[in-house]
Image: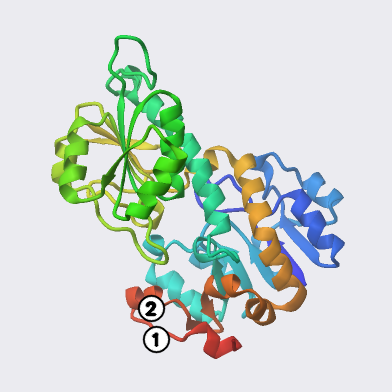
Amino acid sequence: MDIGIPKEQTSAETRVAVTPMGAYAYTREGHRVFVETKAGADAGFTDEEYEKAGATVVFSPQEVYGRAEVVAKVQPPAVDEIALMNEGAVVFSAIQLGAQVDEAVRAMLDKKVVAIGYEILEDERGEFPVMKIISELVGHMAPSIAGRYLSHYEGGRGVALANLPGIPPVAVAIVGAGNVGTTAAKSFAALGVQTHLFDRAVANLRRGEAVVPAVITHMAEAPNIARACEYADVVITAAYVHGDRPPMLVTEEMVRSMKAGAVLMDIAIDQGGCVETSRPTSHADPVFEKFGVTHYCVPNIASAVPRTCSYAFNNNLKEYLAEVAASGVAEAARRKAGLRKGIYYHGGVCTHPRLCDLFSLEYTPIDEIIGG
């Protein structure tokens, strides 16, 4: 099968879904891999490395999409990218319900694309392997980002993420005890920061305590979050709802109550955000100030470390892409229930109920299309 690896068009998107080692694995199995020139350049992978791995480097998006039966990319396909795809092509990418627009949704349906979303792609344990590793990476990055914007020279409170004798520690409130939140809590706690973790599920809080014994846990109810906004130097929202937009958890009133120079990181912004005052920013212009609070709302945080992140995408996508390339999407989805659950569109119909709700589409269960 022919696999296409395009260069990402989204501003400041530096990652690539398949590394040269991944390309080698696919070509070794007899597949042809077409890589758009400089697709991996920002992540430190050269065209020459892809060619040594057996891939063919092509010199336009028209060529890579025109040749590909299966496309692997990072960001959701833009309308102009969808226009270049072959009818019925299979696309592995993020979909991000909170970022979808009607024009792109209609274009995917018109092209009869099979769209497989990283955020709902499951493994045999019911976990989300691609998004789990990216979430953990972002959680590890959170303290360095927060520490930067707490600096006096970045407009912050001028406090350090450290535990020093005789000095009260900085307080961090993390709303959402999933992979991002728990990993972030672990990273902050390791610095001696007073770390508070909020979630609506006691089981998630119990898991958080098991991973981070020093963490202070709270139920994610509005009064508790409101109090945290008053005392915390850093507030991080990382609440995700599988296959849906996240809830709005931090209101404008709560933001107004925060300390001057505090940092608010809406890590869920890629799915629509959890903060009433947040809006997407970029790596080129990552923050804005509202009510004296520094808002950091970059959707593709892990693009700051594209080489590490590209390895993460490649390693956790490989078994699914290889299965589709070897036997076709229908047979692969029959074999792998988690792959089947990751399909948003198939052959001109929508197979994801929440996406159908958001865009008033008719829902068709994927099992009706490919069988059990």
Residue carrying label 1: 362
Say which element carries label 2: helix
Task: Give the class, few, some or many, for how many residues have Cα within 10 Å of label 1's Cα (few <14, many ≥20).
Answer: few
Q: Is residue 365 left or right of residue 230?
A: right
The quarter of the rendered structure image containing the N terminus is bottom right
Q: Position of residue 357 (x, y in %)?
A: 33, 77
Q: Which residue of the protein is positioned furthest toward the top in this rendering? A: 166
Task: Give the class, few, some or many, for how many residues have Cα within 10 Å of label 2's Cα (few <14, many ≥20).
Answer: some
Type of residue at label 1?
Glu
Q: Position of residue 126 (x, y in %)?
A: 53, 65
Residue carrying label 2: 356
Note whether residue 366 is visible.
yes
Note whether residue 62 is visible.
no
Mark 2 vs 1: CB contact within 8 A: yes
Type of residue at label 2?
Cys
Q: Position of residue 90 (x, y in %)?
A: 63, 73
Residue 201 versus residue 30 in the image, above or below = above
Say which element carries label 1: loop
Q: Going 86% across and 67% down the picture, which residue do you hit?
A: 30
Q: Nearer the viewer, residue 240 or 278?
A: 240
Res 113 quadrant in image: bottom right
The quarter of the rendered structure image containing the C terminus is bottom right
Q: Going 77% across and 47% down the picture, which residue do you hit?
A: 47
Q: Is residue 86 left or right of residue 206?
A: right
Q: Is residue 102 left or right of residue 336?
A: left
